[in-house]
Image: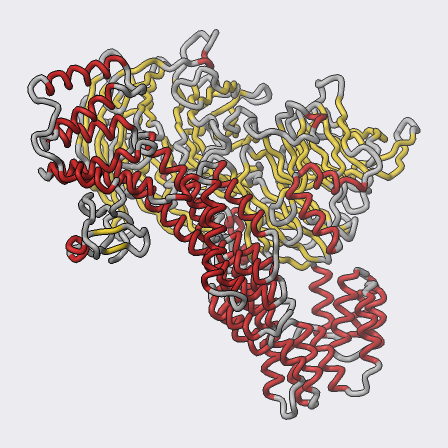
Amino acid sequence: MFIYLCKKIAIPGNVRLRCISWNKDQGFIACGGEDGLLKVLKLETQTDEAKIKGLAAPSNLSVNQTLEGHSGSVQVVTWNEQYQKLTTSDQNGLIIVWMLYKGAWYEEMINNRNKSVVRSMSWNADGKKICIVYEDGAVIVGSVDGNRIWGKDLKGTHLCHVAWSSDSKVLLFGMSNGEIHIYDNQGNFIVKMKLSCLVNLTGAFSIAGIHWYHGTEGYIEPDCPCLAVCYDNGRCQIMRDENDHNPVLIDTGMNVVCIQWNHCGSVLAVAGSLKTTSQDKDVNIVQFYTPFGEHLRTLKVPGKQISALSWEGSGLKVALAVDSYIYFANIRPDYKWGYCSNTVVYAYTRPDRPEYCVVFWDTKNNEKYVKYVKSLISITTYGDFCVLATKADENQPQEEHETESIGATYVLVLCNSIGTPLDPKYIDMGPLFVTMTKTHVIAASKEAFYVWQYRVAKKLTAMEFNQVARTRKEGRERFVFWLCRFSSFPSVSLIKFQGTRDPICAITASDKMLLVGRESGTLQRYSLPNVGIVQKFTLNCHAYQLSLNCNSSRVAVIDLSGVLTFFDLDTQVVTSTGEQMVGEQLKLERKDVWDMKWAKDNPDLFAMMEKTRMYVFRNLDPEEPIQTSGYICNFEDLEIKSVLLDEILKNPEHPNKDYIINFEIRSLRDSRALIEKVGIEESSQFIEDNPHPRLWRLLAEAALQKLDLQTAEQAFVRCRDYQGIKFVKRLGNLQSESMKQAEVAAYFSRFEEAERMYLDMDRRDLAIGLRIKLGDWFRVLQLLKTGSGDSDDALLEQAHNAIGDYFADRQKWLNAVQYYVQGRNQERLAECYYMLEDYQGLENLANSLPENNKLLPDIAYMFVRVGMCEQAVSAFLKCNQPKDAVDTCVHLNQWDKAVELAKNHNMKEIGSLLARYASHLLEKNKIFDAIELYRKANYFFEAAKLMFKIADEESKKRTKPLRVKKLYVLSALLIEQCHEQIQNAQRGKVKGKSSEAASALAGLLEEDVLSSTNRFADNAWRGAEAYHFFILAQRQLYKGSVQAALKTALHLRDYEDIIPAVEIYSLLALCACANRAFDICSKAFVKLETLETLRPEQRQQYEDLALEIFTRHSPKSNKKSDLDDMLDSIDGKLPVCVATGDLILEQRFWMCSVCKHCMKPKEASSRSFCPLCHSTI
């Protein structure tokens, strides 16, 4: 950073100032002094001269109000920016709160304890609370509306300072004896602060200032020190929080009176005085430090005694109260910024993010790209590239190819002009200084420097571009290797030095050499790319910034105090001793310089910033200065591009192109004026005397305007513009003057004028050709439609398609469709329909295409991606790709369709594909999905096998009987579908060859084969019957129909292989006992007691229960059971009613068409569904 005094305001009556404070938001300056002096001032920039912006614009006092109310010396002034209030206090303890009303300040509240004097006041971060400390130890915390929140008397203490934490939870109280006590926000003591800066220090000292930066503009680094405490003896410590036991310690070596952070916590200003040996009086100085204790600058201030300082809200000015004057100093910050390829790269901090926000702003297209970078150190640019120096992220693993830098703590990231990282390089030393050329990046710490050769291919063929895209996906390592493959020698060099007594202070480089400046004044010259030391020079200063001109013959040196000098590297000089030396210090010297830039195309031209003036030098002779405060981006073609970074960073998220300023140097301005006023011939002599390619180009363009082709050609030759020479030759071959004028108008981008000339000449074809070159297809279409003759159909289609592409590139698909339809571009039309999700339009397009059209597969895959199977299959079949159609059906689980297609096209692999998918589902235990798969594919037998398997497993688990019955019913239904499928297939085979009897016989024979291989295929309904009667018997029993329950339970004796015997005979015994059929009950108990599956204790329980029953009742039935008679007589061959469980004795009965089970007519008439299979009656 650079700082210089710029303005001085005298206080009337020579009243001595005691305090000063600058409102960060509204810009008001409050200053208090002796005899009750209190003034509010405001500096405002004049807007008369619109071209001059920023610090260079003149500023005057727009507000100068004296506030009456204090009688004693005003000692404390503090602003509440959020609520626009000013709080002041004098030596009598009087506190006044001032408010802004219609542009003037008025008293709002007054308070006076009449006991002690106010030593310090502080508003918290949100401006809602104020803490006031009195010298006698009284503390008052009040609200913004004047109410007292709490008060406390710290007895035995003398207070002098107070500060809030950023979260308003902690208060720091500075004592007159130098101690700092930490309290909570309710006034409860916590602990004394550890003061490391006072270790081993004796004598009396007092606190000069406590300032806690609240992070309102973010932090320059995560965990950045923000609490500064300074004593009058010059000792200072900067802490991360109030409990930091490892603070940054500074010994300023001066008598300190005041300290303050700037607006973003990046610079701490320490004001005071310094005793000098040469002068008897003290010298007022302001020292500037980083939060990490690094000294930045020293500002000497005239006057007897400095009493206070305050920063402006943007951090670009400092106000200093000295005696009865206010001095203003301008700050030129060291922004992290650069300029490459029409792009301004700048970084700033935000309160909501811990990283730096790095903006790549394309000034040509006014587009910006934002990247977030942790622990950014610097930004360096050259040509089309930019290098970001950062601390390495400990949590992020380093690239594998960085084997030479294991454990590196810093990284240099090479980026392009839109912020895309191209190549990182990890290093293990702090890059305090970074410079780059078109082939090298050089980073230096104070002890060593690091040279890295980078190479990036500028132009890629389509094949190479695709290769890069692929390797990027595979990993950055291969991409970086591909970038560096041009190197035939090591790309990295690390040069270290044995001693560190003479640290590095600045570096610069060109394609030929590297210059390293030392604090002692030594300048070392190294060759590039070999990095070998060539020479040493001696400078008369401590270099702060070095810069080489375009042919590396001179170096510009800016020292710490802002003095610019020049050193000629090639001049041979003879010393007084007769010794011949290389290198000479030039006589030119300029003060207060904070920026400079050499011209890229002239070694004798450079521009420099001196305070708020820009000077351009040619051969060390200055031109008249230009008022500006911009940072110089580029100096080329006699034009200087400057950027007002101060203005941009006031609103960094929305940079304005008005803050990019272009200046023309005098020779360019003079040449343009000569051409306009005198003429081409006279001005050509001036340009001959002051030759430059830009001036010759200016002359050539002026000659073209006047169709002076000979002069234009000569000028193009002098500026080596081959395209210009060819253009002049082409103009010479044209016969028509109006045609020449039209071509010149087009050359100077006056396209509307050129088109009008072509149309006036009735050369609509040339007007159309011009618009085609410009890519203005809307105008091409307009010209084609307005033509008198028939339009070229091919050109019309091309125009429609180009306009369609225009809308498609901007994702305006609906507009694009209209033009693609007219341009008959079916390929892009399909893409638009797909993006619009207009699948009906896509289907219509597919139907309109001829068979085997190359677009059909693409449309089919579009349908596949959205799951539209039928349309996809139709498209595949239309382009004769049945295999893809089948694959689509399989992919979308349309197995029935897949089987049908496979059969129609005689494809054999569908069975294996189906089996493979089913086994995949079974491996994942998705049995029901496999069943559904087989069922949809009409593989009913396999589905039934799986369903029977599930039913058997559920039966063994003793799940709810109704669920098991449903599973058996589903299994049986699948078997029925399988039988029907077999019979239909057999009918199809023998159709027309034999009778229906033969067909049925063939179907039965195939079914016999199935039944012989699987037990359930023989009687598929057996499991369903078992659980149906099991459930029916229990329902009848609970309903009270004990006889019907007994009849139903008797049927269960045939199903011991499905339902466990213990369940069957327990139910039978229960039903028989309830029906008093003790003979059947006795048989059931006998069966239960002989079961081998019972445990001994269970068998004993059955025996005890049987004994209890049959001691009371004889195991004989009192009446003969009708059921037993029937069973004995017909041996159970009569059909059973599935509704009641009773035998059907009638000749007429109802039979289910699905499960083939019977029901009494009476029962069938009262039901809508079959009780067993639930099919409709």
- Callout count: 0
For residue 662, say whether it is visible: yes
Q: Is residue 900 left or right of residue 167?
A: right
Q: Residue 525: horizontal and vertical position, in percent?
A: 81, 32
As drawn, is 2 to the left or to the right of 710? left
Residue drawn where x is 63% and y is 33% of the image: 561
Residue 851 in picture, x, y percent from top left: 62, 72
Q: Residue at x 76, y 37 (%)?
A: 453
Is the residue 978 above or below the residue 548 in the image?
below
Residue occupying the point 64% across, 71% down: 775
Question: Which quadrant holds the N terminus?
Answer: top right
For the C terminus, which image quadrant?
bottom left
- Residue lying at the far front in this picture: please name it: 1129
Q: Quadrant of residue 754?
A: bottom right
Image side of residue 629 versus residue 728, left or right: left
Q: Is residue 252 above or below residue 1162?
A: above
Between 472 and 14, the one lying in front of the other is 472
Relative to 329, is 618 above or below? below
Residue 174 in percent (x, y) is at 34, 19
